Amino acid sequence: MTNIDPSTMTQPARTQAEAAALFRRPFAPGAIGFRAMSKVAYRGEPYAGAQVAAYIGAQSVIQRLNAVVPGRWRQQFQSIPAEFVPAGTRRVYLACRLIVTLPVEEAGPDIDAVYEDLGEIDRASLAGVKALYSDARKRAAVAAGIGAYL
């Protein structure tokens, strides 16, 4: 595989390798959010600090896909069968399959690159089904390299 410098590329991608490189490009600072995940010790105080996670929104994922591979991506969602969910769990899971259709090399035949992951929410969450779909989409996008550096 050739070494591709995404900063010198124009969009949209023509090959799977170009798409992979462009997916990994950093987001503008304004597109990145931060969320406190847990309290941690800081300067001797047991709960004075916080562990913080950076994230992007589901719309940023869609915008990146539309910019890099317009009309060449699709997503499929599927609920997880009950037999695969641990008994007694309070979590709800949804699988997302993100499919990017491009050739491996220019002028070659199109192939599907498939990226998958599971979204999850707490069954009692007020965020609801929309959050479950967003989480699944964002996790599958990370598998493709979108926002993975965060």
Image (cartoon, rainbow, N blue to C red):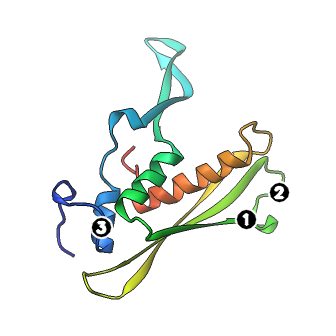
The residue that appears at 52% across and 30% down in the rendered structure is 35
**Residue at 32% across, 55% down:** 24
Q: Nearer the viewer, residue 88 or 75?
A: 75
Q: In the image as oriented, which residue stretches furthest toward the front?
A: 71
Kind of residue sitting beneath label 2 = Ala
Residue for badge 3:
13
What is the CA distance from the residue labelled 1 to the residue labelled 2? Answer: 13 Å
Which of pointers 1 and 2 indicates the residue nearer the eye?
A: 1
Q: Earlier in the sequence, mark 3 or mark 2?
A: 3
The answer for how far apart the CA atoms under marks 3 and 2 are is 44 Å
Q: Quadrant of the C terminus?
A: top left
Q: Secondary structure at mark 1?
A: loop
- Give the residue number, with chain letter if any, for mark 1: 80
Residue pictured at 29% horizontal, 87% vertical = 108
Task: Tell me residue 50's x, y (percent).
Answer: 50, 23
Q: Position of residue 106 (x, y in %)?
A: 24, 81
Inspect this view and state whether residue 111 appears.
yes
Give the residue displayed 44% in from the left and 68% down from the top. 71
In three-dimensional space, the C-alpha distance between marks 1 and 3, rounded to whole angstroms, equals 32 Å
Q: Earlier in the sequence, mark 1 or mark 3?
A: 3
Tell me: 104 left or right of 39: left
- For residue 101, side relative to residue 11 (left or right): right
Q: Residues within 10 Å of mark 3 (few under 14, many from 20)?
A: many
Helix, strand or loop at disc 3?
loop
The residue carrying mark 2 is 87
Nearer to us: label 1 or label 3 = 3
Quadrant of residue 111 in the image? Answer: bottom left
- Amino acid beneath label 1: Ile
- Circle 1 packing at 10 Å, graded few (<14), some (14-19), many (20+), is few
Looking at the image, residue 33 lies above or below residue 68:
above
